[in-house]
Amino acid sequence: MAQTTEAVPQPHSHETRENILFGGVYGAVLACSMVAALTQYGHTDRASRRYDALWLLVTAAASALAHGYAHYIAERAPHRRWDALRTLRDEWPLVAAAVPTVLLLAGAGWGWWPANGVEYAAFVLNIALLFGLGLVTARWSARSWAVAAAIGAVDALLGVVVVVANALIK
């Protein structure tokens, strides 16, 4: 009688570079969107900026948890003991991409720089972050510099869309 040894399928493990690009792009677009939404009513005092920073951090963490949880329950393979925590851990790039904007808003709230108009610096920061993420991950994938710059520009365009939408909606 022949014995078959079938390997138990392992839950899908997302490649680190893929996680960094996905989470980074998601986090930077989320940060742009939150800044646009939170400054909609023109509250630009220091207390409002601290509030904005806290809400951005909470939203990024909640989004990372929701995305990690969705990955975990979507896997149809058997799960091992700590797979849920590993899946959540893999969402760190989303939160990390929002942290620079959190610090920018918090710094305005703490009086390190003017609170009025800091949203424009946040938009520029996130658009630059999107460009950099696209460029770096394309280079990791052995794409040429020209193609990597084009991919970075398309990623940056996501942030520009948020900025334009913010201007049109206001």
Image (cartoon, grey):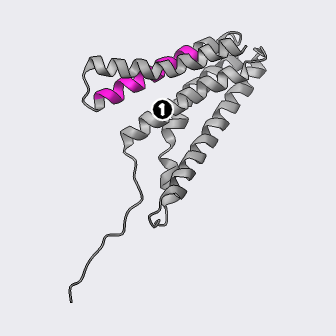
**What count of labels does the image hold?**
1
Q: Position of residue 145 (x, y in %)?
A: 27, 19
Q: Is residue 67 visible?
A: yes
Q: Position of residue 146 (x, y in %)?
A: 28, 16
Quadrant that contains the N terminus: bottom left
Q: Which residue is mark 1?
A: 24
Query: Residue 106, located in which quarter of the rendered image?
Result: top right
Name the residue located 39 percent from the left edge and 21 percent from the top edge: 152
Name the residue located 55 percent from the left edge and 27 percent from the top edge: 29
Q: Position of residue 55 (x, y in %)?
A: 70, 32
* Residue 134 magenta: yes
Residue bounds of the magenta highlight: 122-139
Picture layout, residue 131 above or below residue 142: above
Name the residue located 38 percent from the left edge and 62 percent from the top edge: 10
Residue closest to the eye, 141 or 54? 141
Residue closest to the eye, 116 or 159? 159
The amino acid at mark 1 is Gly
Dot 1 alpha-carbon crowd within 10 angstroms: few under 14, some 14 to 19, many 20 or more = many
Q: Main secondary structure of the magenta part?
A: helix
Query: Residue 51, located in which quarter of the rendered image?
Result: top right
